[in-house]
Image: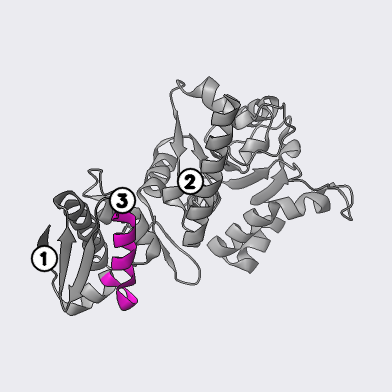
Protein backbone atom coordinates (compact mmCIF):
# COMPACT_ATOMS: atom_id res chain seq x y z
CA UNK A 1 0.00 0.00 0.00
CA UNK A 2 1.51 3.29 -1.13
CA UNK A 3 0.36 6.88 -1.42
CA UNK A 4 0.29 8.89 -4.64
CA UNK A 5 -0.45 12.64 -4.70
CA UNK A 6 -2.00 14.62 -7.55
CA UNK A 7 -1.35 18.34 -7.45
CA UNK A 8 -4.00 20.41 -9.24
CA UNK A 9 -3.72 23.93 -10.61
CA UNK A 10 -5.82 25.59 -7.90
CA UNK A 11 -8.05 25.04 -4.90
CA UNK A 12 -11.03 26.03 -7.06
CA UNK A 13 -10.27 23.30 -9.59
CA UNK A 14 -9.85 20.79 -6.77
CA UNK A 15 -13.25 21.81 -5.37
CA UNK A 16 -14.92 21.18 -8.73
CA UNK A 17 -13.34 17.75 -9.09
CA UNK A 18 -13.96 16.69 -5.49
CA UNK A 19 -17.54 17.99 -5.26
CA UNK A 20 -19.45 19.07 -2.18
CA UNK A 21 -18.11 17.28 0.88
CA UNK A 22 -15.86 15.31 -1.49
CA UNK A 23 -18.88 13.46 -2.91
CA UNK A 24 -17.15 12.73 -6.24
CA UNK A 25 -14.12 11.25 -4.46
CA UNK A 26 -16.49 9.01 -2.49
CA UNK A 27 -18.16 8.02 -5.77
CA UNK A 28 -14.77 7.07 -7.25
CA UNK A 29 -13.81 5.11 -4.13
CA UNK A 30 -17.07 3.16 -4.15
CA UNK A 31 -16.72 2.21 -7.81
CA UNK A 32 -13.06 1.15 -7.57
CA UNK A 33 -13.37 -0.91 -4.40
CA UNK A 34 -12.45 -4.59 -4.63
CA UNK A 35 -13.47 -7.35 -2.27
CA UNK A 36 -9.81 -7.90 -1.38
CA UNK A 37 -8.57 -4.30 -1.43
CA UNK A 38 -9.76 -0.77 -0.82
CA UNK A 39 -8.95 2.70 -2.09
CA UNK A 40 -8.90 5.96 -0.13
CA UNK A 41 -8.92 9.43 -1.69
CA UNK A 42 -8.25 12.47 0.48
CA UNK A 43 -8.37 16.13 -0.58
CA UNK A 44 -6.06 18.68 1.00
CA UNK A 45 -6.32 22.10 -0.62
CA UNK A 46 -5.19 21.72 -4.22
CA UNK A 47 -3.91 18.16 -3.69
CA UNK A 48 -5.58 14.78 -3.79
CA UNK A 49 -3.80 11.87 -2.17
CA UNK A 50 -4.57 8.34 -3.34
CA UNK A 51 -3.95 5.39 -1.03
CA UNK A 52 -4.37 1.79 -2.12
CA UNK A 53 -2.98 -0.97 -4.36
CA UNK A 54 -1.01 0.28 -7.36
CA UNK A 55 -3.58 -1.04 -9.87
CA UNK A 56 -6.42 0.86 -8.22
CA UNK A 57 -4.25 3.96 -7.87
CA UNK A 58 -3.59 3.94 -11.63
CA UNK A 59 -7.30 3.72 -12.36
CA UNK A 60 -8.09 6.57 -9.96
CA UNK A 61 -5.36 8.70 -11.54
CA UNK A 62 -6.89 8.19 -14.99
CA UNK A 63 -10.35 9.09 -13.72
CA UNK A 64 -9.14 12.26 -11.99
CA UNK A 65 -7.05 13.24 -15.04
CA UNK A 66 -10.15 12.96 -17.20
CA UNK A 67 -12.17 15.10 -14.77
CA UNK A 68 -9.34 17.62 -14.61
CA UNK A 69 -9.43 18.06 -18.40
CA UNK A 70 -13.20 18.52 -18.34
CA UNK A 71 -13.16 21.03 -15.48
CA UNK A 72 -10.27 23.02 -16.94
CA UNK A 73 -12.11 23.35 -20.26
CA UNK A 74 -15.28 24.68 -18.63
CA UNK A 75 -17.40 21.52 -18.81
CA UNK A 76 -19.76 20.71 -15.97
CA UNK A 77 -18.55 18.23 -13.36
CA UNK A 78 -21.37 16.21 -11.85
CA UNK A 79 -22.20 12.62 -10.96
CA UNK A 80 -22.77 11.86 -14.65
CA UNK A 81 -19.32 13.20 -15.57
CA UNK A 82 -17.74 11.10 -12.85
CA UNK A 83 -19.67 7.98 -13.92
CA UNK A 84 -18.50 8.41 -17.48
CA UNK A 85 -14.91 9.05 -16.43
CA UNK A 86 -15.06 5.84 -14.39
CA UNK A 87 -16.39 3.90 -17.36
CA UNK A 88 -13.45 5.05 -19.47
CA UNK A 89 -10.74 4.27 -16.93
CA UNK A 90 -9.54 1.19 -18.83
CA UNK A 91 -9.86 2.71 -22.30
CA UNK A 92 -7.56 4.97 -24.28
CA UNK A 93 -9.74 8.00 -24.96
CA UNK A 94 -7.42 10.76 -23.85
CA UNK A 95 -9.01 13.31 -26.22
CA UNK A 96 -12.58 12.72 -25.08
CA UNK A 97 -12.55 15.79 -22.82
CA UNK A 98 -12.00 18.05 -25.84
CA UNK A 99 -14.79 16.34 -27.77
CA UNK A 100 -17.25 16.82 -24.93
CA UNK A 101 -16.64 20.57 -24.71
CA UNK A 102 -17.61 21.30 -28.33
CA UNK A 103 -21.06 22.91 -28.52
CA UNK A 104 -23.11 21.88 -31.55
CA UNK A 105 -26.38 23.73 -30.86
CA UNK A 106 -27.66 26.78 -28.99
CA UNK A 107 -31.29 26.84 -27.88
CA UNK A 108 -33.48 29.97 -28.15
CA UNK A 109 -32.96 30.45 -24.42
CA UNK A 110 -29.20 30.62 -24.98
CA UNK A 111 -28.35 27.18 -23.60
CA UNK A 112 -25.29 25.72 -25.27
CA UNK A 113 -25.78 22.00 -25.98
CA UNK A 114 -22.76 19.69 -25.97
CA UNK A 115 -22.45 15.92 -26.10
CA UNK A 116 -22.31 14.66 -22.52
CA UNK A 117 -20.72 11.30 -23.27
CA UNK A 118 -18.33 9.84 -25.82
CA UNK A 119 -21.17 7.65 -27.12
CA UNK A 120 -23.28 10.75 -27.78
CA UNK A 121 -20.38 12.36 -29.63
CA UNK A 122 -20.03 9.30 -31.87
CA UNK A 123 -23.78 9.38 -32.54
CA UNK A 124 -23.74 13.09 -33.47
CA UNK A 125 -20.67 12.59 -35.64
CA UNK A 126 -22.42 9.76 -37.48
CA UNK A 127 -25.45 11.99 -38.18
CA UNK A 128 -23.08 14.53 -39.75
CA UNK A 129 -21.45 11.98 -42.05
CA UNK A 130 -24.11 9.41 -42.99
CA UNK A 131 -27.46 9.81 -44.75
CA UNK A 132 -29.01 7.10 -42.58
CA UNK A 133 -28.14 6.54 -38.92
CA UNK A 134 -29.61 4.06 -36.45
CA UNK A 135 -29.33 5.19 -32.83
CA UNK A 136 -29.96 2.21 -30.56
CA UNK A 137 -29.80 2.37 -26.77
CA UNK A 138 -31.68 2.53 -23.47
CA UNK A 139 -33.92 5.31 -22.23
CA UNK A 140 -32.19 8.52 -21.21
CA UNK A 141 -29.28 8.40 -23.68
CA UNK A 142 -30.55 11.39 -25.69
CA UNK A 143 -31.26 9.48 -28.91
CA UNK A 144 -34.37 11.43 -29.91
CA UNK A 145 -33.45 14.80 -28.43
CA UNK A 146 -30.04 14.94 -30.15
CA UNK A 147 -31.54 13.85 -33.47
CA UNK A 148 -34.18 16.59 -33.24
CA UNK A 149 -31.52 19.22 -32.52
CA UNK A 150 -29.54 18.07 -35.54
CA UNK A 151 -32.69 18.18 -37.67
CA UNK A 152 -33.58 21.71 -36.53
CA UNK A 153 -30.00 22.84 -37.20
CA UNK A 154 -30.20 21.40 -40.75
CA UNK A 155 -33.49 23.24 -41.30
CA UNK A 156 -32.13 26.55 -40.02
CA UNK A 157 -29.05 26.19 -42.24
CA UNK A 158 -31.37 25.42 -45.19
CA UNK A 159 -29.72 22.09 -45.87
CA UNK A 160 -33.21 20.57 -45.88
CA UNK A 161 -36.64 22.03 -46.63
CA UNK A 162 -38.67 20.02 -44.16
CA UNK A 163 -38.55 18.00 -40.95
CA UNK A 164 -40.62 14.84 -40.66
CA UNK A 165 -40.80 13.20 -37.23
CA UNK A 166 -42.53 9.83 -37.07
CA UNK A 167 -43.51 7.33 -34.36
CA UNK A 168 -45.35 4.02 -34.55
CA UNK A 169 -48.61 4.16 -32.59
CA UNK A 170 -48.11 0.99 -30.57
CA UNK A 171 -49.69 0.73 -27.13
CA UNK A 172 -47.30 0.14 -24.22
CA UNK A 173 -49.74 -1.95 -22.22
CA UNK A 174 -52.55 0.55 -22.86
CA UNK A 175 -55.24 0.92 -25.51
CA UNK A 176 -55.88 3.73 -27.97
CA UNK A 177 -59.58 3.05 -28.26
CA UNK A 178 -60.65 4.72 -25.02
CA UNK A 179 -58.97 8.00 -25.97
CA UNK A 180 -61.28 10.74 -27.33
CA UNK A 181 -61.02 12.30 -30.77
CA UNK A 182 -59.95 11.20 -34.24
CA UNK A 183 -56.86 9.10 -35.06
CA UNK A 184 -54.50 12.10 -34.99
CA UNK A 185 -55.78 13.14 -31.57
CA UNK A 186 -55.52 9.56 -30.32
CA UNK A 187 -51.85 9.22 -31.33
CA UNK A 188 -50.77 12.68 -30.09
CA UNK A 189 -49.88 11.31 -26.62
CA UNK A 190 -47.39 8.97 -28.32
CA UNK A 191 -45.87 11.93 -30.18
CA UNK A 192 -45.56 14.14 -27.07
CA UNK A 193 -41.81 13.48 -26.55
CA UNK A 194 -41.16 14.69 -30.10
CA UNK A 195 -43.15 17.89 -29.53
CA UNK A 196 -41.22 18.49 -26.28
CA UNK A 197 -37.90 18.15 -28.11
CA UNK A 198 -39.08 20.60 -30.80
CA UNK A 199 -40.17 23.14 -28.18
CA UNK A 200 -36.73 22.94 -26.54
CA UNK A 201 -34.91 23.26 -29.87
CA UNK A 202 -36.96 26.06 -31.45
CA UNK A 203 -39.10 27.64 -28.77
CA UNK A 204 -42.82 26.94 -28.35
CA UNK A 205 -44.23 29.59 -30.71
CA UNK A 206 -41.72 29.12 -33.60
CA UNK A 207 -42.26 25.36 -33.39
CA UNK A 208 -46.05 25.78 -33.58
CA UNK A 209 -45.76 28.13 -36.57
CA UNK A 210 -43.47 25.68 -38.38
CA UNK A 211 -45.97 22.89 -37.69
CA UNK A 212 -48.87 25.00 -38.93
CA UNK A 213 -47.03 25.89 -42.14
CA UNK A 214 -46.10 22.26 -42.81
CA UNK A 215 -42.35 22.88 -42.54
CA UNK A 216 -42.35 20.42 -39.67
CA UNK A 217 -44.59 17.37 -39.74
CA UNK A 218 -45.14 15.11 -36.75
CA UNK A 219 -47.14 12.03 -37.62
CA UNK A 220 -47.77 8.36 -36.87
CA UNK A 221 -45.83 5.94 -39.03
CA UNK A 222 -48.96 4.80 -40.88
CA UNK A 223 -49.17 8.23 -42.53
CA UNK A 224 -45.88 7.65 -44.38
CA UNK A 225 -47.14 4.90 -46.69
CA UNK A 226 -47.02 5.78 -50.39
CA UNK A 227 -44.95 8.95 -49.95
CA UNK A 228 -41.50 9.98 -51.16
CA UNK A 229 -39.74 12.56 -48.98
CA UNK A 230 -37.19 14.71 -50.85
CA UNK A 231 -34.90 17.30 -49.23
CA UNK A 232 -36.12 16.35 -45.78
CA UNK A 233 -34.66 15.37 -42.43
CA UNK A 234 -36.68 12.37 -41.27
CA UNK A 235 -36.65 10.87 -37.77
CA UNK A 236 -38.30 7.58 -36.88
CA UNK A 237 -38.57 7.36 -33.10
CA UNK A 238 -39.39 4.26 -31.00
CA UNK A 239 -38.41 2.13 -34.00
CA UNK A 240 -38.27 -1.03 -31.88
CA UNK A 241 -42.07 -1.03 -32.15
CA UNK A 242 -42.15 -1.30 -35.93
CA UNK A 243 -42.61 -4.57 -37.77
CA UNK A 244 -40.06 -5.54 -40.46
CA UNK A 245 -42.62 -4.56 -43.11
CA UNK A 246 -43.16 -1.14 -41.52
CA UNK A 247 -39.40 -0.56 -41.24
CA UNK A 248 -38.94 -1.40 -44.93
CA UNK A 249 -41.80 0.94 -45.80
CA UNK A 250 -40.24 3.78 -43.80
CA UNK A 251 -36.71 3.34 -45.15
CA UNK A 252 -37.96 3.36 -48.73
CA UNK A 253 -39.60 6.77 -48.18
CA UNK A 254 -36.16 8.45 -48.19
CA UNK A 255 -35.90 10.61 -51.30
CA UNK A 256 -33.20 12.68 -52.98
CA UNK A 257 -31.40 15.14 -50.73
CA UNK A 258 -32.86 13.60 -47.60
CA UNK A 259 -31.30 12.04 -44.53
CA UNK A 260 -32.86 9.93 -41.83
CA UNK A 261 -32.24 8.96 -38.21
CA UNK A 262 -33.90 5.88 -36.72
CA UNK A 263 -33.93 5.64 -32.94
CA UNK A 264 -35.05 2.85 -30.64
CA UNK A 265 -34.48 0.76 -27.54
CA UNK A 266 -34.50 -2.97 -28.22
CA UNK A 267 -34.99 -3.68 -24.52
CA UNK A 268 -38.44 -2.02 -24.58
CA UNK A 269 -40.33 -3.72 -27.41
CA UNK A 270 -44.12 -3.40 -27.04
CA UNK A 271 -45.06 -5.61 -30.00
CA UNK A 272 -46.95 -8.88 -29.53
CA UNK A 273 -44.68 -11.53 -28.04
CA UNK A 274 -43.98 -13.50 -31.23
CA UNK A 275 -43.70 -10.44 -33.52
CA UNK A 276 -40.16 -9.65 -34.71
CA UNK A 277 -39.09 -6.03 -34.20
CA UNK A 278 -38.32 -4.13 -37.38
CA UNK A 279 -35.36 -2.49 -35.67
CA UNK A 280 -33.81 -5.83 -34.70
CA UNK A 281 -34.49 -7.16 -38.19
CA UNK A 282 -32.98 -4.08 -39.86
CA UNK A 283 -29.75 -4.36 -37.89
CA UNK A 284 -29.40 -7.97 -39.03
CA UNK A 285 -30.25 -7.26 -42.68
CA UNK A 286 -28.46 -3.93 -43.17
CA UNK A 287 -25.27 -4.29 -41.14
CA UNK A 288 -23.13 -4.61 -44.30
CA UNK A 289 -24.90 -1.97 -46.39
CA UNK A 290 -22.67 0.99 -47.25
CA UNK A 291 -23.76 4.56 -46.57
CA UNK A 292 -25.47 4.00 -43.24
CA UNK A 293 -24.27 3.66 -39.66
CA UNK A 294 -25.44 1.85 -36.53
CA UNK A 295 -24.62 3.65 -33.28
CA UNK A 296 -25.06 1.74 -30.02
CA UNK A 297 -25.50 3.85 -26.90
CA UNK A 298 -25.28 2.09 -23.53
CA UNK A 299 -26.13 2.69 -19.88
CA UNK A 300 -22.88 4.69 -19.70
CA UNK A 301 -24.50 7.25 -22.01
CA UNK A 302 -27.60 7.72 -19.84
CA UNK A 303 -27.84 11.44 -19.04
CA UNK A 304 -30.94 11.42 -16.86
CA UNK A 305 -30.88 11.00 -13.10
CA UNK A 306 -27.95 8.73 -12.07
CA UNK A 307 -30.51 6.36 -10.59
CA UNK A 308 -31.61 5.50 -14.17
CA UNK A 309 -28.25 3.83 -14.81
CA UNK A 310 -28.67 1.64 -11.76
CA UNK A 311 -32.25 0.76 -12.73
CA UNK A 312 -31.08 -0.33 -16.19
CA UNK A 313 -28.34 -2.44 -14.60
CA UNK A 314 -30.85 -4.13 -12.31
CA UNK A 315 -33.18 -5.02 -15.17
CA UNK A 316 -30.30 -6.24 -17.35
CA UNK A 317 -28.99 -8.51 -14.58
CA UNK A 318 -32.45 -9.95 -13.98
CA UNK A 319 -32.94 -10.67 -17.69
CA UNK A 320 -29.52 -12.30 -17.94
CA UNK A 321 -30.37 -14.48 -14.90
CA UNK A 322 -33.69 -15.55 -16.47
CA UNK A 323 -31.98 -16.40 -19.77
CA UNK A 324 -29.41 -18.55 -17.95
CA UNK A 325 -32.20 -20.34 -16.06
CA UNK A 326 -34.06 -21.03 -19.34
CA UNK A 327 -30.92 -22.60 -20.80
Check whether the beta carbons of the residues at disc 2 and disc 3 lie within 8 A of each other. Answer: no
Q: Would you say residue 32 sits in the magenta stretch?
A: yes
- How crowded pointer 1 is (Cα within 10 Å; few <14, some 14-19, many 20+) is rated as some
The foreground one among 68 and 201 is: 68
- Assign the C terminus to one quadrant of the image: top right
Q: How many marks?
A: 3
Residue at point 22% right, 57% down?
60
The foreground one among 197 and 62 is: 62
Q: Position of residue 272 (x, y in %)?
A: 75, 32
Q: Is residue 309 visible?
A: yes
Q: Is residue 245 above or below residue 127?
A: above
Determine the CA span between mark 1 and mark 2.
51 Å
Residue 35's disc is 3
Q: Would you say residue 327 sits in the magenta stretch?
A: no
The foreground one among 77 and 315 is: 315
Q: Nearer the viewer, mark 1 or mark 2?
A: 1
Instruction: Write down the residue under mark 2.
Output: 159
Q: Is residue 324 above or below residue 155?
A: above
Q: Is residue 255 visible?
A: no
The part of the chain drawn in magenta is 18-33
Residue at point 49% right, 48% down?
313
Residue 5's disc is 1
Check whether the beta carbons of the residues at disc 1 and disc 3 lie within 8 A of each other. Answer: no
Q: Is residue 226 above or below residue 69?
A: above
Per the picture, the main secondary structure of the magenta-coloured stretch is helix
Q: Is residue 182 above or below residue 23?
A: above
Q: Is residue 306 left or right of residue 39?
A: right
Q: Position of residue 128 (x, y in %)?
A: 41, 42
Residue at point 73% right, 46% down?
172
Q: Is residue 49 left or right of residue 214?
A: left
**Label 3 residue SS:** loop
Amino acid sequence: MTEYTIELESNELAALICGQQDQYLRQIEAKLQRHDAGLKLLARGDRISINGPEELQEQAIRVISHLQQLAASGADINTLSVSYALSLRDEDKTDVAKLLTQSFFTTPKGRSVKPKTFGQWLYLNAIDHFDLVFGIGPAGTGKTFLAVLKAVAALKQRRVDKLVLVRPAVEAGEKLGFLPGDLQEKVNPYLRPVYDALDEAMGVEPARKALDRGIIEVAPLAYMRGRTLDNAFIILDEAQNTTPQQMKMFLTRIGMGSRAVVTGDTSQIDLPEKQLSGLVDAEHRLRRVQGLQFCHLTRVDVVRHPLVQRIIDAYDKKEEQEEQEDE
